[in-house]
Structure formats: structure tokens, C-alpha cells
Image (cartoon, rainbow, N blue to C red):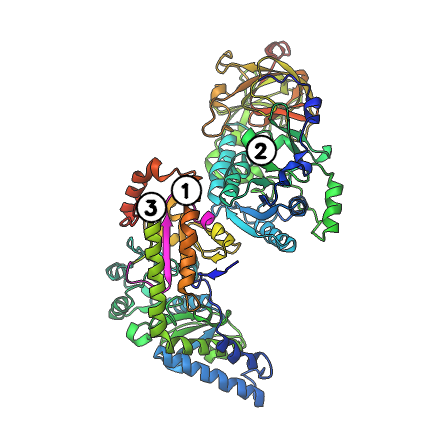
């Protein structure tokens, strides 16, 4: 059976060049970069080089890059680190309702420690309004954290505008760029952010390594205590191979970005249009144009995304619905709910995320099988069918956004 | 249709479906096995795979986020169960999915459980879960995945009566493990799509088979407790989950004298002796919980005994409807043996109103009906000898030999009124 991997927002397949670059550091070049002898210096030199590369791509200085164990750790470090270091100045944090749980749960943790938080809403297309952010700022606001692009619906946020607002009010601004890094241009100065998180395995690098950009002068406590690695900002022996892999993957992604972005966007549009043409009572989630090149997110009315996904899996199509929790079961998406979708519609979501290894044939394979699955599930649906209450249900959709279903 | 064939004869005419009969003859039928990671459901999956079914394993994730329970070990659907089941599925080489039933479980089982207690009843959440979740939503999910059958590790057997075409539910081969008490709610269309692969094995045989297949044989904590109350303290659970259950009121004797105060009727069960906090010459037992007066009614040991009961939301398996009284073996609790009884049809609302020991209108008493049930069937049961604690909210299940005739939810006990007054 054919396998069509269209879950590139969950993780990506590491590029062979990346694996190759890492291999020596999993073998003969095993030195601890903090030690003083030859093989350690070799590891240290590679680490420094990787840091320079990443910094250059981000438009940052090498001293502003902190390597971490994941994008999640970078988010935790930025939010908790800045909050605790600046508590005297301010104890209020602003974030959005559609952040990744690495951000949302970090902020919730801070609330348990006595901080206050504002979760700005999003519109029906999953976009944050910078005016809402500005209106939420108080003289106690210490940090704003708004993601660069959403992992579920792909909407790209107006980071530059929010950064200006943050600057005007003298508030630190963090963005979670885990979904955008390597896929669309990310330059910390153009974006105007003070802190930025990224993760290697989202751009064809290895799992278990991420990075945090922290602009010089940002007051931040360290989150992981221990040794003095990463200029005393993140303890623990560096994952040298992982960091080499991250840098290599980022280098490759940046060099090919323009071409890949266009190619993947074309695949995305082919998939979106194909689904819209073939299936009725479906809506596209997220912004129609300001969206990630690989992101396709739909809600199919009358059915559960879970059943859809499992049927796709049986045909070799790897997608996702909502966000996977630790046990692998599916939660109704907090993102779709925040966008105002009715609960039962949010349950019918399907996210397919395309990447560099996908082809037109992959898209056509999905288009060949998806309509039949949707039709079959709708025929068994406990929510009724189009004939039963198509209009009523569409009216519900209209409250949230324009319905994009086409009757055939 | 009346139950006219003698049950053992009917049982003999079966098609031996649970022993690998005709179902797999036509090749690769797909079956979804509800897996807990324990020995029974693991062996169930292994047996079906062995017989040529296309087996999909699945575990329902039911823990709601709102549940105020710290310890989430144990139970058939816990996170630990997911990890165990996933490992077994991978050993068997079958696809495995975790299916999210959190909201459904909370709405249809947990809140039902709490509401029933709040009304002075003693619910059985396992029966409710089987009816609504396992053989309701999970069965539907199985069909969405293209499966013809759902299978579980329950100890029970299903046979098709060739003469009538009905699917019969029979006790397990291993009588000590029999679980038919919690399965009487299955309807014909559900039984037709259900397989119990270990129902024809003894527990020892199941264990041996698991060992020979290299599957984990370790026993999960036997689920006598309720899966969403791992510490077995349902009172604490109710206080946290439904704080309004803390509603103090009077403890009355059968004559209506106030003997003390209770914490809330939800925290008492019929037949309970301890924890009443009343000094008395004779031991006192809870004989009734009256939600209207918010009263706990206590009496002497003899007052707990009931001559019979009224049951509602009756599901008949062996036949469509009961037309005249019949002799049965009745089971009124999971862990008590059956007792001889006569069960007869009862017309709803025909009972004399205002029975002093009853919880009010019987037509509103049960809550185990499925949405869309044509009507709530009621029956009246008379025991051959008085029984302790026929408890509203628990189920009564009727047997004829190994055959499960059907069952229902106990609405109220029937007690000899004269006895109470004469025993003064």
C-alpha cells in the first residue's frame, strides 16, 4: 500500500544531508564541548559554527542563540524565564487563545504562581488583531507572546505590527516560530521580536533539538539549572549532533526556501481546490491567503475527524485532526473553538500538511479517496446528513465564517 | 413472541458463533476489539486474529479533564491501559487506535452516576457504560471503520437461536467469571454485531493461552471498583464532582420520627448499617432514601427485606415481550447469587401511588433507556423468599439456566406493608 505522509506540521522526515552531517558527532567526534582536550575542541568548534549559521539566518548575533532540547523547551524558557526575571516590573502576560500548548500551559503555570494573563481572541480566520493586543497592555505587562503562524490552521499572524506595539509600550515580545522557521522568511529584526522559538524537526532536521533567540539585553532567568552551558542560560551538555543537524537543516531550508515555498503552495492549493470541488459541506479553516505554504485544514460537517483520520490511515494517508495528545487520542481543537466554530463542527476537522517530499501524485491520491470516505461516514453519521439538516448546520457555520461548501 | 421453547433446548440450537462458527467462513471480516491491555481482551484479539479476522485494536480514552481524580492508574481505559494495549497490539501485529470518548463518557456515564446518587439511587455505571459507550458509540465507531463486529474480553456467550433467529446471551463457561449481569442491556442489533471470544474459555484457559502466545498474563486490578473512582471512595468523588450532593436532612424512622441528621442522601445506600451516627438498642439499617423529603429512612434488619420489586427500562433478550408471569432466577446485584422469583408484566403508572417505601413515580424512575426507545417496559418481580436490599438504581437480571432472558433497572422494592406496622 502507498504511504502518503501529509502530517509535516507534526514532524518531518530528516533530510539525508542532515543525517550525514550529524553522523560523525554520533560516532568518532564524541567530545564534550565543555572539555579542554582535542576531541572536545573539535566538538566546540562545530557547535560554534552551527551557532553562527543559525544566527546569520535569523539576522541575529551568535551570542543571542540558545540551543534547547525542543521548541517546547524554548517556549517554556522564554515565557517563564522572562516572567520570573521581570516580576518586580510587571506580572501581567499577554498571549493568544490559539497558541501551542507549550505557550498556553506555560502561561497557565505562571497564573498559578500569581501572575495575571490575558488571552486575546482571534477572528473566524484565526487571526489576532494587533489592536486587541495593544488594548490589553497595562503598566504591569511584562511579556507578550504571539505565535508566528498557527500549527493547526496555518494562519500567519501580523507579528511586525504587534512588535511595534510592544516596543512602543516597552514590553518584551516573544514569538513561537516553530511552524514558520525554514518555510517562510524569519528575520528577527524584520519581525522586531525580542525572543523567538524554533524546532529542528519541523524543517527536516532531527527531533530533540530546538533553539531560542533572545535579543541582547533581554532580562531572562534560566529555566534549566546545572552547568554553565549556553552562556549560563541553559544547563546540560549540548546535543552536539542535534545542533549540527539543526544548523544544516536550516541552512538547506533557507537556501531552497523561495522555490520550495512556491512548489508546496501549489500543492496546497491543488488539494484545497480539489476537496472543495468534490465534497460538499466543507469549510477551509484559517486565512485564505495568509497561511503556511503546506497547511490545509478543513472541517467536514456531520462527521468526526477521528473516524476520517482512521479511515485515511487504513489507506496509507497520514494526517491529523485537532492536536494529538500524549496518549494519541484526539481532543476537540482549542484553536477551532477559539475561532468560533461550533463544537460538533470542530470535531470534524482534518489537517493535512504538505512538505518537500510530497508530490502531485500524493495530492491526487488523497483526492481520489477522501470523497468516498466522507460520503461513507456521512451515511452512518449520528449527526444526521445534509438532507436532514444541511441548512441549519450551515447557518451555524456562517456565524463563524463564510461557508465554503459547494453543492455538487 | 412468547418464550415457548425450553431454554436449554434453545441454547442447544445455537450456531456456536462464539466458538468460531460460520462468521469467518466468508474470509476476512474486520472486527474491532476493545482492548484494555489486560489478559482477557488481549487473548480475545489473539483468538480472532488466529481465526482469520482482520483485527483492529482500540482503547477508549474516557478520562475527562474535569475529573478531580489524581491517581489515574487502573481501570479498563486509563492512560496506563493505553500503553499496555498498544504494546499487545504491536505484539499481535494489528493496527491499534486510541479513540476519544471523554466527553461522551462524562455526559452519559459520570454525570448519570452522580445524578442518580443525588436522587437517592445506587447506579451501576458499568452497565450504563456498556449500553451507551461500548455497545453504543464504540460499536458505531467500529462500523465507521468498516468493521462488521465489535469484540470485547467479557466473559459471556452469544448464540443465535436458529429457529427464531434471535441472538441469545448466555452465561460464561466459567461461571465464577460470568459478566452477563452487566450485559443484559444489549439489544438484538447489538448482540448480532458482538463477539465475546473468551466467553467459552475458563479464566485459567485464557491465562494459559496468553502465556503460550507470549502475551502479558498479569492481572489488572480486578475492576470491582468503579474505573473513574480509583480509590473506591465514591462519597469523596461525589463531594468533589457534584458539591450540591452535600445537602443535610433528617434521618427518620419508619414512623417519621427524626432520629438524627444526614450529610446528603447521595452518601447513603439501601441496607447500609455503618456510619449513621445514631445510638440505638437495635442495629439500624437504611431502608429508604426519599429525595422529596430529602430524608434517609432507617429501620431494623427485617425492614430492609423486600418481597419483590418493580423494575423499569426492561430489555428482553430471549424474546420480544413478556405476556404472562414466568418463573425465573433473578439476580439483583453483581455479587449475589440468583434467587427464585416470578416476573410478570406491569402496566406503567398502574401502581398505587404514594407507596411509602418507593421513590416516587416509577415511570420517571429509571434512566437507563436509550434515546429513541419505543417505550419503557416495566415488570413486577416477586421473590420466592424475601431478599435484602433490592436497591433502586441497581439492575435485576433474569435467567433461565444459562440463558439471560433480560433485565431492567430496579425502580423500587416491594415490601409487605403490614410487617412494618405489626413489628412496632
Q: Looking at the image, is B374 positioned above or below residue A42?
A: above
Helix, strand or loop at disc 1? helix
Residue underneath mark 2: B192
**Total labels drawn:** 3
Helix, strand or loop at disc 2? loop
Q: Residues within 10 Å of mark 2 (few under 14, many from 20)?
A: some
- Mark 2–mark 3 contact, CB under 8 Å? no
Q: Residues within 10 Å of mark 1 (few under 14, many from 20)?
A: many
Q: Chain of mark 3?
A: A
Left or right placement of residue B9 versus residue A400 in this view: right
Query: Which of the two residues, A158 or B197, is positioned nearer the viewer here?
Result: B197
Residue B178's disc number:
none
Marks 3 and 1, the one that precedes in the sequence: 3
What's the magenta region? A288-308
Residue underneath mark 1: A378
Residue A281's disc number:
3
Amino acid at each position: 500500500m502507498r504511504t502518503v505522509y501529509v502530517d509535516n506540521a507534526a514532524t518531518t522526515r530528516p533530510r539525508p544531508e542532515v543525517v550525514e552531517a550529524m553522523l560523525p558527532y554520533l560516532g568518532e567526534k564524541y567530545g564534550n564541548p565543555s572539555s579542554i582536550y582535542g576531541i572536545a575542541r573539535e566538538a566546540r568548534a562545530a557547535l560554534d559554527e552551527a551557532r553562527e549559521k543559525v544566527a546569520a539566518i535569523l539576522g541575529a548575533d551568535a551570542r543571542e542563540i540558545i540551543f534547547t532540547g525542543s521548541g517546547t523547551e524554548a517556549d517554556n524558557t522564554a515565557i517563564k524565564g522572562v516572567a520570573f526575571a521581570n516580576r518586580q516590573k510587571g506580572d501581567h502576560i499577554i498571549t493568544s487563545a490559539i497558541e501551542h500548548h507549550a505557550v498556553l500551559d506555560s502561561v497557565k503555570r505562571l497564573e498559578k504562581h500569581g501572575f495575571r494573563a490575558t488571552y486575546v481572541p482571534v477572528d473566524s480566520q484565526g487571526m489576532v488583531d494587533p489592536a486587541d493586543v495593544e488594548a490589553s497592555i497595562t503598566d504591569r505587562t511584562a511579556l507578550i507572546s504571539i505565535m508566528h503562524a498557527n500549527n493547526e490552521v496555518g494562519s500567519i499572524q501580523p507579528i511586525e505590527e504587534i512588535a511595534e506595539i510592544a516596543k512602543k509600550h516597552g514590553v518584551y515580545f516573544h514569538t513561537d516560530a516553530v511552524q514558520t522557521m525554514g518555510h517562510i522568511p524569519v528575520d528577527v529584526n524584520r519581525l522586531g521580536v525580542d525572543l523567538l522559538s524554533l524546532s529542528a524537526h519541523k524543517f527536516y532536521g532531527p527531533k530533540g533539538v530546538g533553539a531560542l533567540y533572545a535579543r541582547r539585553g533581554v532580562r531572562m532567568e534560566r529555566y534549566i539549572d546545572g552547568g554553565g552551558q549556553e552562556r549560563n542560560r541553559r544547563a546540560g551538555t549540548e546535543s552536539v549532533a542535534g545542533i549540527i543537524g539543526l544548523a544544516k537543516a536550516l541552512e538547506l531550508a533557507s537556501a531552497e526556501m523561495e522555490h520550495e515555498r512556491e512548489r508546496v503552495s501549489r500543492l496546497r492549493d491543488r488539494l484545497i481546490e480539489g476537496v472543495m470541488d468534490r465534497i460538499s459541506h466543507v469549510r477551509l479553516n484559517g486565512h485564505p491567503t495568509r497561511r503556511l505554504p503546506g497547511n490545509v485544514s478543513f472541517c467536514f460537517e456531520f462527521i468526526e475527524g477521528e473516524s476520517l483520520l482512521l479511515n485515511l490511515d487504513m489507506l496509507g494517508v497520514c494526517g491529523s485532526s485537532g492536536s494529538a495528545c500524549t496518549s494519541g487520542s484526539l481532543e476537540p481543537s482549542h484553536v477551532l473553538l477559539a475561532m468560533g466554530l461550533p463544537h460538533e463542527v470542530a470535531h470534524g476537522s482534518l489537517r493535512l500538511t504538505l512538505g518537500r517530499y510530497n508530490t502531485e501524485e500524493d495530492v491526487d491520491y488523497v483526492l481520489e479517496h477522501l470523497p468516498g470516505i466522507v460520503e461513507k461516514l456521512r451515511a452512518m453519521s449520528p449527526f444526521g446528513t445534509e438532507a436532514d439538516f444541511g441548512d441549519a448546520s450551515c447557518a451555524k457555520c456562517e456565524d463563524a465564517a463564510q461557508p465554503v461548501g459547494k453543492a455538487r | 413472541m412468547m418464550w415457548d421453547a425450553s431454554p436449554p433446548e434453545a441454547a442447544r440450537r445455537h450456531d456456536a458463533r462464539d466458538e468460531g462458527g460460520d462468521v469467518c467462513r466468508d474470509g476476512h471480516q474486520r472486527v474491532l476489539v476493545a482492548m484494555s491491555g489486560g489478559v482477557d481482551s488481549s487473548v480475545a484479539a489473539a483468538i480472532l486474529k488466529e481465526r482469520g479476522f482482520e483485527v483492529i485494536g482500540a482503547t477508549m480514552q474516557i478520562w475527562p479533564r474535569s475529573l478531580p481524580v489524581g491517581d489515574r492508574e487502573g481501570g479498563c481505559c486509563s492512560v496506563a491501559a493505553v500503553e499496555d494495549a498498544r504494546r499487545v497490539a504491536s505484539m499481535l501485529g494489528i493496527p491499534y487506535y486510541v479513540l476519544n470518548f471523554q466527553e461522551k463518557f462524562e455526559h452519559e456515564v459520570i454525570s448519570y452516576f452522580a445524578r442518580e446518587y443525588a436522587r437517592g439511587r445506587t447506579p451501576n455505571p458499568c452497565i450504563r457504560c456498556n449500553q451507551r459507550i461500548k455497545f453504543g458509540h464504540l460499536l458505531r465507531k467500529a462500523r465507521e471503520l468498516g468493521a462488521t463486529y465489535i469484540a470485547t474480553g467479557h466473559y459471556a456467550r452469544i448464540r443465535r437461536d436458529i429457529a427464531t433467529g434471535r441472538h441469545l446471551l448466555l452465561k460464561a463457561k466459567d461461571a465464577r467469571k460470568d459478566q452477563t449481569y452487566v450485559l443484559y442491556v444489549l439489544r438484538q442489533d447489538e448482540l448480532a454485531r458482538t463477539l465475546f471470544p473468551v466467553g467459552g474459555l475458563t479464566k485459567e484457559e485464557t491465562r494459559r493461552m496468553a502465556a503460550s502466545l507470549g502475551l502479558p498474563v498479569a492481572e489488572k486490578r480486578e475492576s470491582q471498583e468503579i474505573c473513574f473512582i480509583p480509590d473506591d471512595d465514591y462519597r469523596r468523588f461525589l463531594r468533589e464532582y457534584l458539591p450540591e450532593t452535600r445537602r443535610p436532612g433528617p434521618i427518620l424512622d419508619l414512623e417519621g420520627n427524626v432520629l438524627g441528621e444526614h450529610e446528603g442522601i447521595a452518601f447513603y445506600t439501601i441496607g447500609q448499617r455503618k456510619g449513621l451516627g445514631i445510638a440505638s438498642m437495635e442495629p439500624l439499617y437504611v431502608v429508604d432514601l426519599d429525595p422529596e423529603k430529602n430524608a434517609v429512612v432507617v429501620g431494623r434488619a427485617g425492614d430492609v427485606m423486600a418481597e419483590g420489586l418493580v423494575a423499569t427500562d426492561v430489555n428482553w433478550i430471549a424474546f420480544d415481550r413478556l405476556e404472562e408471569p414466568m418463573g425465573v432466577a433473578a439476580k439483583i446485584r453483581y455479587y449475589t447469587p440468583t434467587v427464585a422469583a416470578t416476573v410478570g408484566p406491569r402496566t406503567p403508572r398502574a401502581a398505587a401511588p404514594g407507596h411509602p417505601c418507593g421513590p416516587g413515580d416509577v415511570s420517571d424512575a429509571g434512566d437507563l433507556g436509550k434515546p429513541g426507545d419505543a417505550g419503557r417496559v416495566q415488570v413486577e418481580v416477586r421473590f420466592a423468599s424475601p431478599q435484602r436490599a433490592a436497591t433502586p438504581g441497581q439492575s435485576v437480571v433474569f435467567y433461565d439456566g444459562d440463558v439471560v432472558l433480560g433485565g431492567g433497572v430496579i425502580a423500587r422494592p416491594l415490601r409487605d406493608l403490614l410487617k412494618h406496622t405489626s413489628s412496632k
